[in-house]
Amino acid sequence: MLKAERLQTFVALGNFLRAADSQPELTELAHRAHIRNNWFTVSNTLRAIDAIAREFLAEDKLSNWLGQYRAEPNVPQPVGVVMAGNIPAVGFHDMLCVLLSGHKLLAKLSTQDFVLIHYFIQKIKEINPAFSDAIEEVERLNAASAYIATGSNNTARYFEYYFAKKPHIIRRNRSSVALLMGEEAETEFLPLGHDILDYYGLGCRSVSTLLVPEGYDFVPLLRTLEPQASEYLNNHKYQNNYDYNKSIYLVNGVPHYDNGYLLVTENDALVSPISVLYYETYKTQDDARQWLTTRTEQIQVVASARGWLPGSLSFGQTQRPGLTDYADGIDTMAFLDSL
């Protein structure tokens, strides 16, 4: 199967996902995913599918992206992918990269995201049966010649041990940061709210820390986001986390802000618990840049109002990555080209 045929398969998948006639099937899929994993609400799952269809599977975007890489591998290799399951269909990009690069995918699916990734695999095979020999769902990856694995810092140590002798990409915990100047309009807080709260803050591209000037007033931000309370408190898993973290802060006398469903507290750890947003302060813009520079290896993306900081994203963009927004900044396609 040549590159052009592989490309057209995914273009057809994108057309299917965007088609009006497909929405009842996708809604039913989202309900099944929610039954399997209560964090995957129907609205979040449909949001993730829409982002895949529009950001990953538009023909012009796919063609331009693929044009940067080799057309065919020297020898197709079985590539083992240990997929994450923290947000809906989070492993899709790795699957896309392996298959479009011309290699064979050995996919170890996350139990948390089995429904969605299994569905996409079956749909790809339905669109183009030639992919049946190029995709295998497996429990063990012994047959792989290279590996892509995503997990926590703890599991990454195991991955490094087991996969050390073969080419690999090992991804660890990362989180995202929003840099505020203190001059943002309240209308800019709504898109920032999506960066913080979409997918309940469970993604590595979810903003879990705010970097703010000393003396920053959090009231406008929390007031702007307050009307969304019911959307989050209607999820019992989220509310349980909010109630627990709030009680811990109250019992221990930890200073914090609270708008009824989101807690904000000063903390130098970058990964905040569910329902909690951390912040740190800076004196000057140079201090802020230095703070970010020293934490580069821990940060996935940085957001700022109107993208004023070079290299940052505008508010509202962190949760919709494009094809070249590789996790941990490691070019997955270049890695696959090198095999």
Image: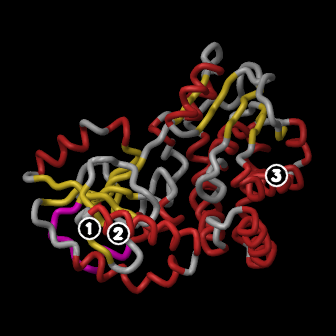
Q: Are the two marked residues, 1 and 2, in contact with CB atoms closer than 8 angstroms?
A: yes
Of helix, strand and loop, which one carries label 1?
loop
| Colour convention | secondary structure
Please report the bounds of the magenta region as a residue range: 180-192
Looking at the rendering, which quadrant does residue 235 occupy?
bottom right
Picture residue at 36% right of the left edge, 79% below the top: 225
Q: CA distance from mark 3 to mark 2?
A: 42 Å
In this picture, residue 100 sits left or right of residue 318: right
Question: Could you tell me the amino acid type at mark 1?
Answer: His
| Residue bearing mark 2 | 263
Quarter of image, res 146: top right
Instruction: State the mark number for residue 124.
Output: 3
Is the residue 127 above or below the residue 234 in the image? above
Q: Residue furthest left?
A: 283
Is 173 placed left or right of 28 in the picture? left
Q: Earlier in the sequence, mark 3 or mark 2?
A: 3
- Residue lying farthest front? 251
User: Along the horizontal axis of the image, is 326 left or right of 313?
Assistant: right
- Residue, far top: 165
The quadrant in which the C terminus is found is top right
**Residue 117 in the image: x percent, y percent?**
74, 53
Residue found at x 51% / y 54% = 203
Foreground pick, 307 / 234: 234
Of circles 3 and 2, the one toward us is 2
Disc 1 residue crowd, few under 14, some 14–19, many 20+, Cα 10 Å:
some
